[in-house]
């Protein structure tokens, strides 16, 4: 693909993203249009444990939304940020402003996202993700740097 075509596609995707109600597949989107609900308690996410993907809106001043995996561990919701894909900006945006909106099965929750630092918890999250998504527990995913964010009430 030529550089000009790639630039045109990127520009078109950017224009489209701002008009969508959230992301479109793997293409990021803008602000969710639905009204916020209060974020569930930190340990009350069990009803959504089987949901394969959720959507996350970050950067409240200029909202950007994306589709990602989610893992419910001990009742809490965790979102991984895999850094094998260097174009991911959202984890840094969350570190700058932890206010996020989470859309799961059509409901939008106003929450916060806090980075997980505990090594034992991160290992448990890796194992849980491998099990949920059918990944080899000692494969590439086990050796990849992943930042984890816990979703918490505001």
Image: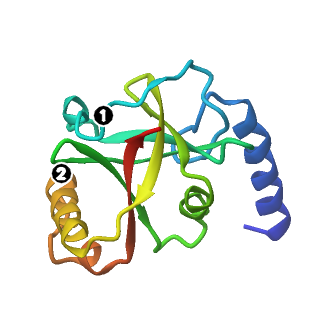
Please, which residue is most extreme toward the bottom here?
A: 143
Outermost residue toward the front in this view: 154
Q: Nearer the viewer, mark 2 or mark 1?
A: 1
Task: Estimate how packed mark 2 is, as few (under 14), some (14 to 19) or many (20 or more) residues with alpha carbons within 10 Å.
Answer: some
For the point 40% across and 39% down, which residue is it? 54
Image position of 120 (left or right of 89): left
Quadrant position of the N terminus in the picture:
bottom right
Q: Position of residue 21 (x, y in %)?
A: 62, 27
Query: Is 23 left, or right, of 123 in this rendering?
Result: right
Q: Nearer the viewer, residue 143 or 147?
A: 147
Residue tagged 2? 132
Specify few, some or many for label 1: CA neighbours under 10 Å numbering under 14, 14-19, or 20 or more. Answer: some
Specify the quadrant of the image occupied by residue 38: top left
Does residue 140 appear to the left or right of 69 in the view shown?
left
Q: How many marks?
A: 2
> Going from the N terminus, do you reach mark 2 or mark 1 first?
1
The residue positioned farthest toward the top in the image shown: 35
Residue position marked by numbered label 1 in the rendering: 41
Instruction: Kindly state the secondary structure of the residue where label 1 is placed.
Output: loop
Q: Residue at x 25, y 75 (%)?
A: 119
């Amino acid at each position: 693909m030529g550089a000009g075509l790639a630039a045109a596609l990127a520009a078109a995707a950017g224009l489209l993203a701002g008009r969508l109600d959230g992301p479109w597949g793997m293409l990021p989107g803008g602000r969710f249009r639905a009204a916020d609900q209060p974020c569930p308690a930190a340990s009350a996410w069990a009803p959504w444990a089987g949901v394969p993907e959720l959507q996350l809106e970050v950067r409240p001043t200029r909202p950007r939304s994306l589709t990602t995996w989610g893992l419910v561990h001990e009742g809490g919701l965790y979102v991984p940020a895999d850094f094998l894909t260097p174009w991911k900006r959202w984890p840094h945006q969350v570190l700058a402003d932890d206010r996020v909106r989470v859309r799961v099965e059509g409901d939008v929750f106003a929450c916060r996202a806090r980075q997980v630092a505990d090594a034992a918890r991160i290992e448990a999250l890796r194992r849980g993700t491998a099990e949920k998504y059918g990944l080899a527990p000692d494969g590439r995913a086990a050796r990849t740097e992943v930042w984890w964010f816990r979703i918490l009430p505001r």
